[in-house]
Amino acid sequence: METAIGPIFRLNRMERKYVLNDLTEKTNLSRAKISNFENGKIKLPDNEVRELYTIIGIALHDVCENEVFRKVSNVLFEMYNSIYYGKKADNELKQLNELKENARYTYPYITWLFGEFLYYVYNYDETYNYEKAVKTILNHKRYLSEKIKQMMYDTVGVYYKNQIRYEIALSNLKWAIQTNIDETVLAMAHYHQAMIYVEKGSSFKALSALETAKRIFDSDMNHYRSFLCTFELATVHAHFKEYKKAEELLKKCLKDPIAENNKIMIYNNMIWNYILMKNLDSAIRYSQYAINVDENFPLAYMYLTYIYWKKDNNGQVERYRKLMLEKAEYANKYDRYLLDAISTLTSRKTKIKRKEKDLMRAFINFRRIGDANQSMFVLELLISLFDKDLVKKTEYMEYALDLYNLEPEDDEPYEWNTPPYWF
Amino acid sequence: MKKIFTKKLALALVFMATISVMPHVHDENCGYDATTDSGCEFGVTTYGFGHFGD
């Protein structure tokens, strides 16, 4: 671990935006020597290291590496534990920040950086530079202990999942599962994997991942995580068209004290489930509940617009369409495409050609962000739009088929449905 | 004998090539059944479902 001091020095230098030339001008060391030191190839005497740190404006003081490492790791484990039980980790972040000055000179710094990254993955902050942190941590992962490395793969997986980069997220989560040191992290990785499978529509895989995760959460008496699993499980059941079961699970979630202050997402899934069940009256009721909880929840207005459009109640469609467009500012950029699409679809004045154009634009945008589910959703709207125009309908169905070919289940072996008896 | 074997092999290759370019649709994906031409209805995808938390 001794050689870590060079690479860590480089991180500090780059953080302070100094280039190599700044150092060679102010010391007697050659550029090659500093470069080798930064790459961990050679060691420099203490006084020279101290001099280099002084140039970039950091006073190096003597620390016991192992002691610092132990402290940073402990805070990190506490932070992960808080996240695991769904508690706030602000206190741990504070403790971590206090350790920065001592941790920044040698190998514990990577563990420290990971701790900061861990906090911000679960507490989104737009000022934090996620890409840079991921790159640094992955490049220096050899300075992490095995257990922390497993946590790191899980956390990086969550980060990429939130970025909708599912392939890279899944490969990181697979590493976390293969590393298999800590059962807690293993369960978390399974749970995060299940979330991606749900998004991708691979329900069987999602189900088995959720079962594995839930078993561990239950044995840990982790009620919070079990609740999350139940919630995801409802989606999986809806996907299997077992809407009654999904409704039952969601109602169970609704009664849970954990959901006390955050019912909006449960209502959202309830509404969607009722739409699938074709129980439009219940869907309307739950949309009203959702609006009562948060009057700026744009998706509730979208559901109401769609439901009344289905019911041919033009007055209500116009009313909720207007409200939906007003509340669109609270939606994220991806939901906004969807609101636009629904708004176009339900508008009476818009001509069918214009509707097609708008929906196609939404489709292209969804393809660009690589979300197959959303693309599929818009295609379904297009197909229902051209219900009577068989040529157009076929065209969009072909798009739908293409979409599935673009995202094959590559890790499932091809199965011979009909054995080739004929030759 | 050798000729027949080569013919069989060629047939098998053609069969496999055909299979590999055929559209590969899972019912698992969204209930879309290409054979009945019924198409997906609104909302058969999982799109509308959200997650509670990481």
Image: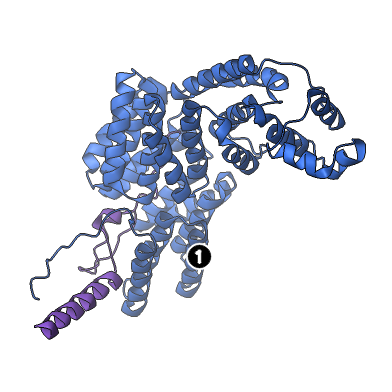
- Residues A363 and A63: in front is A63
Q: Quick check: can you spot residue A299?
A: yes
**Residue identified by numbered label 1:** A364
Q: Percent position (x, y) of residue B47?
A: 39, 50
Name the residue: 62% across, 40% down.
Answer: A130
Name the residue: 34% across, 32% down.
Answer: A229
Name the image quarter holding residue A373. bottom left
Q: Is residue A388 left or right of residue A61?
A: left
Name the residue: 74% across, 33% down.
Answer: A9
| Colour chain A appears in | blue
Quadrant placement of the C terminus of chain A: bottom left
- Residues A169 and A335: in front is A169
Chain colored purple = B
Quadrant placement of the N terminus of chain A: top right
Q: Percent position (x, y) of residue A381?
A: 39, 63
Name the residue: 83% across, 24% down.
Answer: A47
Does residue A286 lie above or below A79 as drawn?
Answer: below
- Residues A108 and B20: in front is A108
Letter of the chain that mark 1 sits on in the rendering:
A
The type of residue carrying mark 1 is Ile
Q: Percent position (x, y) of residue A384?
A: 34, 66
